[in-house]
Image (tube, helix red, strand yellow):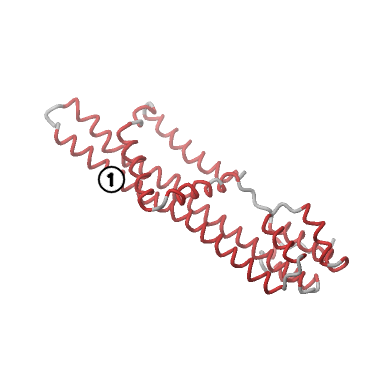
Amino acid sequence: MDLSTILGIGAAFGLMLMAILQGGPLSIFINVPSILIVFGGTAGNALVHYPFSDVFDAINVAKKTFLHKEQPINDLIIQLMEFANKARKEGILALQGAMEEVKDEFLIKAMQMAVDGQEPETLRAMLSTEIEYIEQRHEKGSQIFLSLAAYAPAMGMVGTLIGLVQMLQTMDDPASIGPAMAVALLTTFYGAVIANLVCTPLSGKLQMRSKAEVLQKTLIIEGMQSILSGENPRIMEQKLHSFIAPKLRESTFNK
């Protein structure tokens, strides 16, 4: 579970609610017509722009911002070095038994390809193609949330115009001015909240998640290609360490 995402959104909404409650009851910020205009309009625009399947896929991808727990990159390097030493001593087929302790599906696939006797360049080409399509899927999810971040304030402005028209039509009735003004202001408020506290941050986190996942998968390709090529483990470790910052590097040969 990603605590930074949960704490960030929780803090943003929590502090906003505290500020609201300092000035009056929360109920004055709840307006059903405004909710229908902003939430309904934003959802409708998303479905016009994207197919049903893409919208639901984006929701599933968004779960990664809350539930995904990344494996530390240095732990992955150490694991690959263990496989390299095992393959060097016992042969590449020894990786068949080691797959039972691996949880990463991409790494399992790479190990299976190595055990099956794929050439190093073939392994790289096939797995690199898979990475490209993973990036495309992640990019689509991020773009959908960016689109929602654009639609929500726009629908808020539409709601504001609706509220102002209603208010101007009933200027002779003071009792109706308040509800119309509430629609006018709260739709803008809802649109701003959806865009700036939810959709834009989630889009940014998805982009960061995608980059981190691609980095790990690229590192796996480099490691498995080195193992298949019979590369010296020390050279392989230096190559893999080039993927991370110097302060994070931990050599397995110093233990």
142 left or right, relative to 32: right
Residue 236 found in image quarter: bottom right
Residue 211 found in image quarter: bottom right
Nearest the eye: 42 or 2:
42
Please tell me how many numbered marks the rendered image carries: 1
54 left or right, relative to 163: right
Residue 11, how many percent across, how many down? Answer: 51, 39
Q: Which residue is mark 1?
A: 157
Residue 128 found in image quarter: bottom right
Q: Badge 1: few (under 14), some or many (20 or more) residues near its Cα, within 10 Å?
A: many
Residue 41, how many percent across, how many down? Answer: 33, 43
For the point 26% across and 41% down, the residue is 160
For the point 40% across and 43% down, the residue is 194
Residue 118, how many percent across, how many down? Answer: 73, 70
- Figure quadrant of the C terminus: bottom right
Nearest the eye: 138 or 181:
138
The answer to whether residue 190 is above or below residue 22 is below
Residue 201, how many percent across, how many down? Answer: 48, 49
For the point 31% across and 39% down, the residue is 37
214 left or right, relative to 174: right
Judged from the image, the secondary structure of the residue bearing numbered disc 1 is helix
Q: Amino acid at mark 1?
A: Met
- Figure quadrant of the N terminus: top right
Residue at the extreme right of the image, as rendered: 89
